[in-house]
Structure formats: structure tokens, C-alpha cells
Image: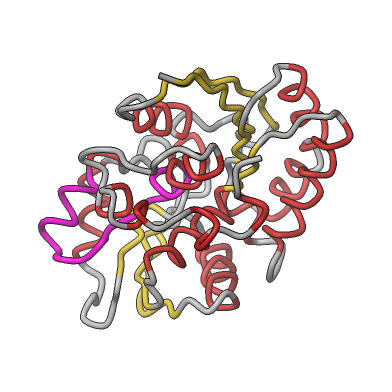
């Protein structure tokens, strides 16, 4: 059984991604993982704080490079998507270059890019979204996905601006918001389009109830981390994305070069 070190760059007020992604990967059948974090200061999910947070990225990358991680997750979806069309590719290219300067061939995943790539891997082109953000930021997330060829058929923003409060949104509220969406034209539902809004226990439940594939920022991140490490993206009880059907396609046929294992 192989072992892999996962680096995670997270907002300082985030407590969910460091719970959900390890919980997912702990179920993997053929590998074990350790998790190593670096934090960027951010409390309120506002355009100004997101820009200030992103400016701290270089320090975090250097810290995780010191730990010799095998893969790195830049874990704040809205901080990247709110900066404009295609921003996840620019950010990932800059982080990859910084890692290369340190001689570290780590796989690189951003939460923003992971969601785009997971949707592409499942061939879901019409999606519905549940987001915690204030409406102007939610609209930027929608615009980012639509620029990637994803048709967002319906969405809801829970309008929680305090990032610590986002981490306390009850599962019942998230599932209730999902039930209120018009899913008649959707190929998939992203039940938490945010790594801080808890949703992991809901993914399989919502998929069974609503009758379509259900993803979250956490399951998309886990999927792409596994692919970046060259591991089968198969995890039980985590929705169809991680059930093995998508993972049966060979890595190089699905993933862009930035996510292929070194």
C-alpha cells in the first residue's frame, strides 16, 4: 500500500476541507495519506479579502514545498473563480512554476480547477449549484463555470458572508436548498460549490433522493488529487463521481497535463 503526503492551502477561517478531504481519502483501498496545511488569512468572503488572501499564496506554497508533499490542493474555490475567466489555469501555472523552482514534482490541484475537471470527466454539461456566497460572488462563480462550457441551469446562494459561519451551515439547510432547485434539465448537482460549506454526508443521500449525480467541491478535489497521484479515483459512499465508472477511463485520456501524475 502506497503512502502520499497531501499539502493543503486553506483560508485561515476554513475548518471543513481539512475534515472532508481526509475523511474521503481515508476510505481509499490502496493508499494511505497524511495531510499538511498552510493557511492564508481570510475571515469575510468579500472581494477585498479574497484578493488579500490570494496574495499570501507564495508563502504557503514554499511552506508545503519544505514538507516535500506529493500533491498540493489550493483549497478555496471562490477566491480563484471570482478573479475572472480561466483564472484557475493561471493560478495553477504559477504554483506549478514555483514548485518546479524548488525541484518538487508535486501534483497540483485547485478546488476551482478540480470542479471544472470533475464535471468534464463526468460529461455533465448542465448543472445546478448550491453555494453559500453573497449573490455578487455567486454570480461570478456561475460566470466562471459557464465560460468553461458548463450550462448552469439553476443555482441558489445562501448569502452567508462570514466564512466561519459558512462552516456551520447545517446539512438540513444545504439539502433543503438543493431540493428547491429546478433539476429537470440538470445532468448533475453540485451540492456544495465551496470547500467550507459542509456537505459530505449529503452527497450519497442526495444522489439517491434526487436521481442524478451529485458532486461537491470536496469530492471533486479528492477525485482530482487521486488522479494527480496516479491512483484509482474510487471511494465508497461518496457519489457516482468516485464510484469507479469515471475512474475506469485511463488518466491521460481525461486529464489535462497539469493534473497528470509526474
Q: Residue at x 58, y 54 (%)?
A: 78
Where residue 144 sits, quadrant-wise, is: bottom right
Q: Position of residue 102 (x, y in %)?
A: 86, 29
Where residue 118 sits, quadrant-wise, is: bottom left
Name the residue nearer the viewer: 94 or 44.
94
Where residue 206 sits, quadrant-wise, is: bottom left
Quadrant where the C terminus is found in the figure: top right
Q: Position of residue 2 (x, y in %)?
A: 46, 21
Q: Is residue 206 within the magenta segment? A: yes
Q: Residue at x 20, y 66 (%)?
A: 212
Name the residue nearer the viewer: 243 or 134.
243
Q: Residue at x 27, y 40 (%)?
A: 170
- Horizontal side of 9 relative to 54 (left or right) equals left
Q: Residue at x 64, y 39 (%)?
A: 107
Magenta segment = 202-221
Mostly what secondary structure, the magenta segment? helix
Quadrant where the N terminus is found in the figure: top left
Q: Position of residue 123 (x, y in %)?
A: 39, 71
Name the residue nearer the viewer: 3 or 202.
3
The image shows a total of numbered marks equal to 0
- Horizontal side of 12 relative to 22 (left or right) equals right
Name the residue nearer the viewer: 244 or 128.
244
Q: How is the image coloured?
A: secondary structure
Residue found at the very far right of the displayed protein: 101
Q: Position of residue 222 (x, y in %)?
A: 44, 41
Q: Is residue 55 within the magenta segment? A: no
Q: Is residue 241 above or below residue 227?
A: below
Amino acid at each position: 500500500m502506497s503512502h502520499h503526503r497531501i499539502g493543503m492551502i486553506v483560508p485561515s477561517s476554513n475548518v471543513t476541507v481539512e475534515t472532508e478531504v481526509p475523511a474521503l481519502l481515508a476510505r481509499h483501498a490502496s493508499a494511505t495519506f497524511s495531510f499538511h496545511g498552510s493557511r492564508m488569512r481570510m475571515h469575510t468572503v468579500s472581494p477585498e479579502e479574497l484578493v488579500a488572501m490570494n496574495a499570501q499564496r507564495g508563502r504557503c506554497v514554499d511552506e508545503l514545498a519544505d514538507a516535500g508533499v506529493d500533491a498540493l490542493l489550493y483549497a478555496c474555490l471562490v477566491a480563484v473563480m471570482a478573479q475572472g475567466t480561466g483564472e484557475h489555469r493561471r493560478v495553477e501555472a504559477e504554483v506549478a512554476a514555483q514548485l518546479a523552482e524548488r525541484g518538487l514534482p508535486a501534483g497540483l490541484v485547485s478546488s476551482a480547477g478540480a470542479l471544472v475537471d470533475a464535471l468534464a470527466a463526468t460529461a455533465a454539461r448542465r448543472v445546478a449549484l448550491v453555494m453559500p456566497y453573497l449573490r455578487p460572488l455567486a454570480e461570478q462563480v456561475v460566470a466562471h463555470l459557464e465560460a468553461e462550457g458548463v450550462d448552469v441551469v439553476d443555482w441558489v446562494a445562501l448569502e452567508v458572508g462570514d466564512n466561519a459561519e459558512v462552516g456551520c451551515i447545517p446539512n438540513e439547510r444545504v439539502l433543503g436548498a438543493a431540493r428547491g432547485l429546478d433539476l429537470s434539465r440538470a445532468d448533475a448537482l453540485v451540492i456544495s460549490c465551496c470547500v467550507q460549506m459542509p456537505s459530505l454526508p449529503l452527497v450519497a443521500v442526495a444522489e439517491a433522493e434526487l436521481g442524478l449525480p451529485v458532486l461537491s467541491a470536496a469530492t471533486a478535489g479528492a477525485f482530482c488529487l487521486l488522479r494527480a497521484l496516479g491512483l484509482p479515483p474510487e471511494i465508497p459512499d461518496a457519489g457516482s463521481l468516485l464510484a469507479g465508472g469515471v475512474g475506469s477511463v485511463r488518466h491521460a485520456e481525461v486529464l489535462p497535463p497539469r493534473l497528470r501524475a509526474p
